[in-house]
């Protein structure tokens, strides 16, 4: 695993005393960048061909739009889930250091990757009324100290000038998804989310945000709740795709 540089999370203040450094290799960089060119080049991008529904990349030669095995034979309630980077190597290390290592400053490079999704043809030029982060159960959020999706959504909201609204809440504590297969993930999440009291998404176009897309089960369950509450469309974007 790559050793990540621990930088001051207050760049405006620290810039008076310290040079800007790459969060991975500590090489001097220009502000407001967080990764040097060399480390940025090590982030594995998702390139065509990939699944139009969930961004799962395919190694074969496919010229037309297709849906992958992950999406076939089940209902996914989001219109599309977009990710520009694969959760491998450097990307995976950054996500884990941010999510589990409490290195909150790493939200900045992850949010930059998240913002790159907006140039994807599935999202480019599309109007969104609000950005909604995938919620954590209150007990999990207290344990972690923050909701990683909410921190990323906050930065993206500023980038694209779309209001952030935490209209969803997680009402059922679920065990970690990592040990489950696709069907078990869907069952584990059933009725885990609901719309907050007095929240209104009727006739709205929603962009749903999370840190990583694996099977899409979490995003799909959130999208189902939003659609049942009257949302016209629900697209999703994540910093990385497992």
Image (spheres, rainbow, N blue to C red):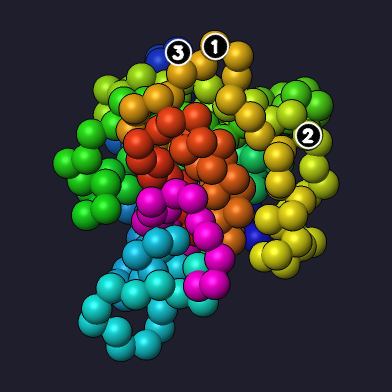
Q: Position of residue 59 (x, y in %)?
A: 40, 83
Q: Secondary structure at mark 3?
A: helix
Neighbour class for label 3 at 10 Å: few (<14), some, many (≥20)?
Answer: few
Q: Nearer the viewer, residue 20 or 54?
A: 54
Q: Is residue 204 above or below residue 210?
A: above
| Distance Cα–Cα, label 2 vs label 3 | 40 Å
Q: Nearer the viewer, mark 2 or mark 3?
A: 2
Is most of the magenta stretch helix, strand or loop? loop
Q: Position of residue 221 (x, y in %)?
A: 59, 45
The quarter of the image holding the C terminus is: bottom right
Neighbour class for label 2 at 10 Å: few (<14), some, many (≥20)?
Answer: some
Q: Which mark is residue 198?
A: 1
Q: Secondary structure at mark 2?
A: loop
**Magenta includes 79?**
yes
The answer to whether residue 213 shows anywhere in this view is no
| Distance Cα–Cα, label 3 vs label 1 | 39 Å
Q: Earlier in the sequence, mark 2 or mark 3?
A: 3
Q: Please report the residue visible at 51 percent of the width from the left and 56 percent of the height from the top.
A: 76
Q: Please report the residue visible at 29 percent of the width from the left and 31 percent of the height from the top.
A: 128
Q: Nearer the viewer, mark 2 or mark 1?
A: 1
Q: Earlier in the sequence, mark 3 or mark 1?
A: 3
Q: Is residue 25 above or below residue 135?
A: below
The quarter of the image holding the N terminus is: bottom right
Q: Which residue is mark 2?
A: 172
Quadrant of the rendered structure where residue 187 is?
bottom right
Q: Earlier in the sequence, mark 2 or mark 1?
A: 2
**Magenta includes 177?**
no
Q: Which mark is residue 13?
A: 3
């Amino acid at each position: 695993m790559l050793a990540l540089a621990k930088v001051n999370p207050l760049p405006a203040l620290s810039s008076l005393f310290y040079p800007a450094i790459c969060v991975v290799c500590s090489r001097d960089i220009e502000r407001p960048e967080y990764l040097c060119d060399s480390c940025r080049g090590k982030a594995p991008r998702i390139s065509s061909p990939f699944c139009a529904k969930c961004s799962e990349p395919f190694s074969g030669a496919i010229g037309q739009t297709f849906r992958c095995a992950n999406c076939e034979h089940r209902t996914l309630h989001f219109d599309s889930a977009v990710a520009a980077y694969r959760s491998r190597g450097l990307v995976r290390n950054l996500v884990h250091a941010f999510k589990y290592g409490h290195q909150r400053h790493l939200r900045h490079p992850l949010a930059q990757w998240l913002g790159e999704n907006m140039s994807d043809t599935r999202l480019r030029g599309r109007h969104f009324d609000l950005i909604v982060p995938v919620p954590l159960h209150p007990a999990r959020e207290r344990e972690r100290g923050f909701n990683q999706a909410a921190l990323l959504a906050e930065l993206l909201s500023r980038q694209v000038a779309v209001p952030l609204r935490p209209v969803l809440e997680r009402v059922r504590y679920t065990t970690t998804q990592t040990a489950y297969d696709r069907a078990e993930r869907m069952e584990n999440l059933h009725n885990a989310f609901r719309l907050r009291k007095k929240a209104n998404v009727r006739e709205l176009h929603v962009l749903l945000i999370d840190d990583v897309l694996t099977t899409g089960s979490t995003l799909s369950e959130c999208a189902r709740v939003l659609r049942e509450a009257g949302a016209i469309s629900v697209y999703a974007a994540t910093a990385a795709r497992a």
